[in-house]
Amino acid sequence: MKTTVADQRPDRPQVGDGVGRFAMMRRRLLRDLRNPLFLNGYALMANTGVTAVLGMGYWLLAARLYSPEDFGRSQALITAMRLFAGLTALGLAGALARFIPVAGRRTGGLIGRGYLISTLTAVLAAVGFLLTLPFWGENYASLAGIGPGLFFLAAVAIWSVFTLQDVALAGLRKAVWVPVNSVCFGLIKMGLLVALAGALPDDGIYVSWIIPTAMALIPVNLFIFGVLVPRNARRAPEGSRPPGFRQIGRFLAGDYPGAFSILAIVYFLPVYVASRVSGELFGYFAMAQTLGAMIELLAINMATSLTVEGSADRSKLVANCRQALRRSYLIILPVSLVTVVAAPYILAVFGPGFSEHGTLLLRLMALAVLPRVLIEIYLSAMRAQSRARTLAVVQIGLAVLVLSSSVLLLPVTGIASVGYGLLFSEILVALLIFGGLRKILGSSKTTHTPSAREAPEAASWST
C-alpha cells in the first residue's frame, strides 16, 4: 500500500497511536480556549462540575451530621430562598448576558440597576411568603418570628445579587473566574457546615449557605466594578451607542415572562413538593433533584455563552450555534448516560433512603437533559436576535406542561412525578422547536431581520 506524504506528517496521529490522539485532542482544546464562545462556555461548565463535586461533598457531610428531618427541612428553606431571590434575578440574567457585551460606558449602571431591582423585588415577594406561612406547611414553620424572618429576608437579598454576579462575569467575558468563586464558596460552606453541626443542630445547614454567600459578594463585585466594567467601557467601538432603556425594556417584556416560567419549574415546583410531603421525604427528593439540575446546568451554561457571543457579533451566530450544539452533546451525552446507569450507586453514598426514593427521579431528570440541550440552544439564538415573543411562548409553554403534569402525577407517582413531567414536556417542546432550530443551523446568515421599528436600535449594537 502506498504511503502518502500527508500520512507521514509527524503531527498527524497514526492509527493506534494513543499519544498522537492525545496531542490532537490537546491542540483542539487549546484552539477552543482561544475562542471566547468556548472559553466562557467551558468555564461555566467547569463551574458546574466544581459545584457538583463540592456540592456532593457538602450534602454527604450534611446527611451524616444532621438528622433526615433537619436535612430535608433545610433543603426546603434553601429552595424557598432561591425561589424568591430568582424572581427577578433569573429574568434579568438573560438581559445582562444579552446587553453587557454591547453596553459600553453604561455597563456599570446596567449591572447596578439589575442588582437593585432584583433585590427589592425579591425581598418584597419574600415578605408576602412570610405573611402566609401557615399555607406552606410544617417545613417552613421555623421561619415564624421576627428574628428568623429578618434572617430569611437578608438571605434572599444576598442570594439575589449572588445569582447575577456570575452572569455579569460571563457577560464581561470573564467566566473563567466563576469556578474560582465557586471553589472558595464551596470550601468555606463545607467548613461552616461541620463547625455549626454542634452549635446549631437544627439550622446549621441553612446558616452555612448564607454566610459564605455574603462573604463572596465583596471581592467579586470589587473586581467587576473596579476592573472589568471600566475595561468593557474602553473596548466599546468609537461612536457606538449603548442600548437604550426602551430596547432593554422591550427585551425584558418578552424575555421575563418566559424566564419567570422557567423559575416556576426550577424553584416553585420543589417548594410545592415540600409543602405536600414530610421533611424526610423532601430531603430524598431534593438530593436527587439537585444532582439532576446540575446536569441540566451544563446545557444552560454553553447556551449562556452563546447568547453573549451572538450578541457581540451576530454574523457568527449560526456558526456558534452549530459549534455549541456539538460541544454540548459531546460533554452532556456521556454524563447523562453514566448518571442513568449509576444513579442508585451515586445516591446510596448519602444513605440507603436516598437511593431507594430518589433513583427514578434522578434517572428521569438525566434523560430529560438531552432534549433540553436543543431547547437551550434555540432559546439562546432567540435572545441574541432579540426575538422576545418567541422566547416567551416557548418558555411559558414548557413551564405550563411541566407544572401541570408534575402536580397531576404527584399523588400517583410520588416525588418521581417531577422527573416524568420534565422528560415528557421537554421531549414535546424539543420536537415543536426542532424545525426552527434546524432552520437556524442550516442558514448561511442570521435568520432574523430587524423590523423597521427595531432597525435604528439594532444598528447601534450589531457591530
Image: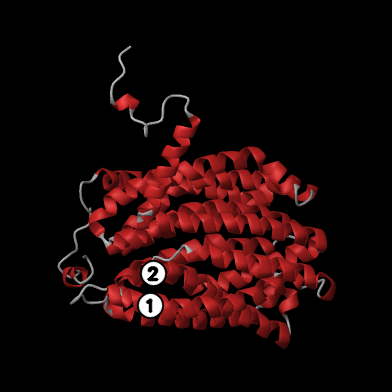
Q: Going by the image, does 359 lie left or right of 446?
A: right
Within 10 Å of disc 1 (Cα), the crowding (few <14, some 14-19, many 20+) is many
Picture layout, residue 23 above or below residue 433: above
- Quarter where residue 381 is shown: bottom left
Mark 2 / mark 1, whichever is N-terminal:
2
Q: Amino acid at mark 2?
A: Leu
Give residue 131's position: percent from left, percent from top.
Answer: 64, 82
Scheme of colours in the image: secondary structure
Give residue 101's position: percent from left, percent from top.
Answer: 33, 69
Judging by the rendered image, the residue that carries numbered circle 1 is 229
Most extreme residue toward the bottom is: 146
Residue contact at pointers 2 and 1, CB within 8 angstroms: yes
Within 10 Å of disc 2 (Cα), the crowding (few <14, some 14-19, many 20+) is many
Question: Which disc, if any, is residue 396?
Answer: none
Give residue 88's position: percent from left, percent from top.
Answer: 47, 74
Residue under the point 45% across and 34% down: 21
Residue under the point 38% across and 81% down: 108
Q: Amino acid at mark 1?
A: Val
Judging by the rendered image, the residue that carries numbered circle 2 is 172
Quarter of the image containing the C terminus?
bottom left
Most extreme residue toward the left is: 452
